[in-house]
Image (cartoon, rainbow, N blue to C red):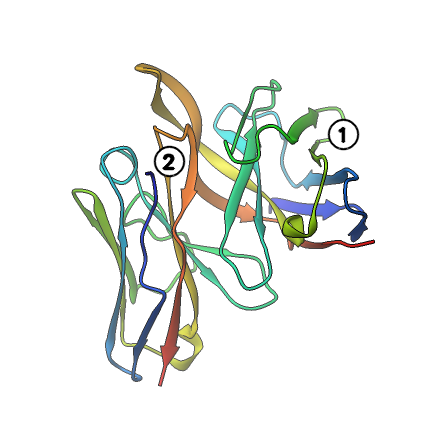
Amino acid sequence: QLQLQESGPGLVKPSETLSLTCTVSGGSIINNDYYWGWIRQPPGKGLEWIGSIYYSGFTYYNASLKSRVTLSVDTSKNQFSLQLTSVTAADTAVYYCARDTRIIVTVAASPEPRGSGHFHHWGQGTRVTVSS
Amino acid sequence: QSVLTQPPSASGTPGQRGTISCSGSSSNIGSYPVNWYQLFPGTAPKLLIYSNSQRPSGVPDRFSGSKSGTSASLVISGLQSEDEAEYYCAAWDDSLDGVLFGGGTKLTVL
């Protein structure tokens, strides 16, 4: 049974960097069929996709967050991580990691593999508050 | 603008059929499969429907999904009190080069 578990500080100061790690167990992060993503839900708001990473290290991000987000993967530890810089109160949210199913999409008129928004397995979520 | 539009709220009585819509465009729903999620407060989202109409193992068959053109629907036949939750649609969007979630629908079972 695949399991994902987020870890990281629950409190981050404004202007600092939010760092979270997702540990995958019960299966390998090295898998051609899946991407690994981060999604968040601010209090009282909806779900927002942050970005996704392939085991090779290929990444793609939500355009609205792209300038502040970096995803990385450590296949030796079966983990992937999120860094979000220059945080503000608007980044307060429950952050989830999840496994996304690969499909072929059209990027700049060319077929490219990406995650499909089919997140079958999720972590339990970790609440991060941005406050001084 | 690439968005997936859901009604903010929906309601029904036990036993009724409930429907939640998700309206998009050719760059998302019109070209790619739609997935649906169920959220209860304080718990992680649960995949309810994937690839427009497929149910993961363990999801009751009273949940069904469909897609036509640039719109998708989640249907719950025979509403139960435990179905009271938030529901989100999601799909890939070419214009954004990313995954798009709908705004969510709060379902109330009266």
Q: Is residue A13 above or below residue A55?
A: below
Q: Which amino acid type corresponds to the residue marked 1 in the rendered image?
A: Lys
Mark 2 lies on residue: B92
Q: Is residue B7 above or below residue B69?
A: below
Residue A31: image quadrant is top right
Q: The numbered mark 2 sits on a residue in which chain?
A: B
**Horizontal side, residue B107 vs residue B41: left or right:** left
Q: Residue at x 72, y 34 (%)?
A: A85
Residue B24 image offset from top left, x and y in percent: 27, 45
Q: Residue at x 60, y 23 (%)?
A: A55
SS at mark 2 in the image: strand
How many angstroms separate mark 1 from mark 2 (CA)? Answer: 29 Å
Residues A4 and A2: in front is: A4
Residue A121 image offset from top left, x and y in percent: 54, 47
Mark 1 lies on residue: A77
Residues B61 and A100: in front is: A100
Residue A119 image offset from top left, x and y in percent: 48, 44
